[in-house]
Image (cartoon, rainbow, N blue to C red):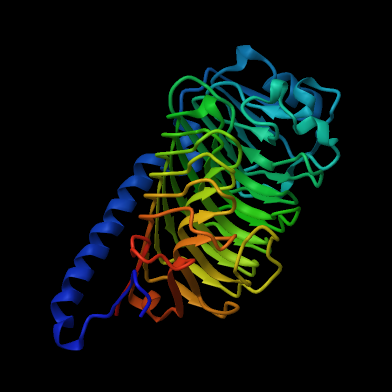
Amino acid sequence: MQKGLRLVRPSNTKWLPVTLILYCTISCQKEKIQNIEEQAFSTSDSRNSNRLYSTRVEVSNIDELYAAVDNVNYEGALLLISPGIYVLNANRPNGGRIEFQKDMALQGLPGHAESVIIDASQLPGSSFIPSLNIPAPRTGAIRMGKGNNSIEWLTVKGNSTSQALSAIDTDLIGDGECNITIAHCIVTGGRIGIDMRNVGLASKNRMIHAALMDNEILENLVQQGQGIELQNANGASGAVIRAVLNGNYVHGNKVGLRSFNNNANNTKTDSGSIIIQSNADRFEENGIGIFLASSLNQGASTTANSNTLSFEAHGSDIQNNKGTIPSDVPDVAPGGLYVAGGLSANSGEVSSNKLQVKLFGCTLSDNNGPDIKAYGYLSVRGILYGTHNVATIHLAGVSANSIVTAIASVPNESEGTNIINVYHDR
């Protein structure tokens, strides 16, 4: 057995107490998640009807949409969007992007997300370059992140230019924490469908609370082609993302869900934290169902150290992921779940990062290759640039039937500080 690799399978003689403990653990976790959902979500209709908006604005054409979102007097407003196709126009402010005011919300037609379409496909690449490249050189067609922002019951069509980072992004910097809700939406046609992102030095120590509920996220195939991405990136040290995903159908993308603390420039990204809870989500017919890396360093001399990522799923499915994958994913074919405690794409340091994955009653099946491919540490160059990276995977119930390929360190580390732990609890 490779040094640093720990595979633990409880014996049958000790299974009764473990089962009782596991049952209690799962019950407590489900109750905890239910409480979180009730507090954070309620239902979308009751949330919008009960929330005290400063004003309600009815929007029936593209002129009225721009007039509302670009009006600073509409902070705290609920925009009620009538059925129709709203084609974004580069001649409008912000290059034609939709940029939310503080506490602003958009709602389409409840029960019919397909009836209201915000179409960013006609925007030129220049529309996705924010003023002074702040907080980053590329952004999304719809930008959120100031206070409490939400989008519900509509369709967002992305853009295929190389400058367009996402269909929906959360990189608008406001005062304090931000709360994002995206519910009952269809998001398609972009490089990233939904990008939950703290990015740049302006996002140091920033916190995002996110709720993604009952969305269909499909056929985001431009470049990396990611359905959902959650990332602290490019200098956003100490930033935090807490996300609850519930009932989303993520399919036909190159990567269904991708999450990491990422350093891709000359600014360190250290001590970031991402916590994801997935409940009854479906990641199906993508190239890779889910890609998780506690830390990814694409820089030559900077650090991506002491980051954490936690992913916990209850009753979610990761199935039939066999399609096209992006070219920047190293050492992997299409498959279900791909994870790494630390990942080096360049020569910058990647050390002391921790990844934890817990799957309770999740079905992983009919994926290309192993259902789960896991590393404590992986260097794309085959040279050791990091130590003390740990990835831990707990598989309970039907999840424990998953086929797992687990490797402690690539290249091999003689000291054994890069570790992969896999626990099967049947």
Residue occupying the far top of the picture = 73
Residue 99: which quarter of the image?
Answer: top right
Instruction: Indicate left or right for 205 with 7 as reference.
Output: right
Residue 159's place in the image compared with 359, above or below, is above
Residue occupying the far bottom of the picture = 13
Image quadrant containing the N terminus:
bottom left
Residue occupying the far front of the picture = 414
Residue 114 place in picture, x, y as percent: 71, 50
Residue 198's place in the image compared with 112, above or below, is above
The residue sitting at 74% across, 19% down in the picture is 67
Residue 24's place in the image compared with 146, above or below, is below
Decide if residue 201 is in sight here: yes
The residue sitting at 70% across, 35% down in the picture is 138
Instruction: Indicate left or right for 236 with 390 as reference.
Output: right
Nearer-the-camera pick, 117 or 158 = 158
Residue 359 place in picture, x, y as percent: 38, 66
Residue 316's place in the image compared with 232, above or below, is below
The residue sitting at 68% across, 42% down in the picture is 166
Residue 375 place in picture, x, y as percent: 45, 66
The residue sitting at 69% across, 71% down in the picture is 323
Decide if residue 213 is in sight here: no
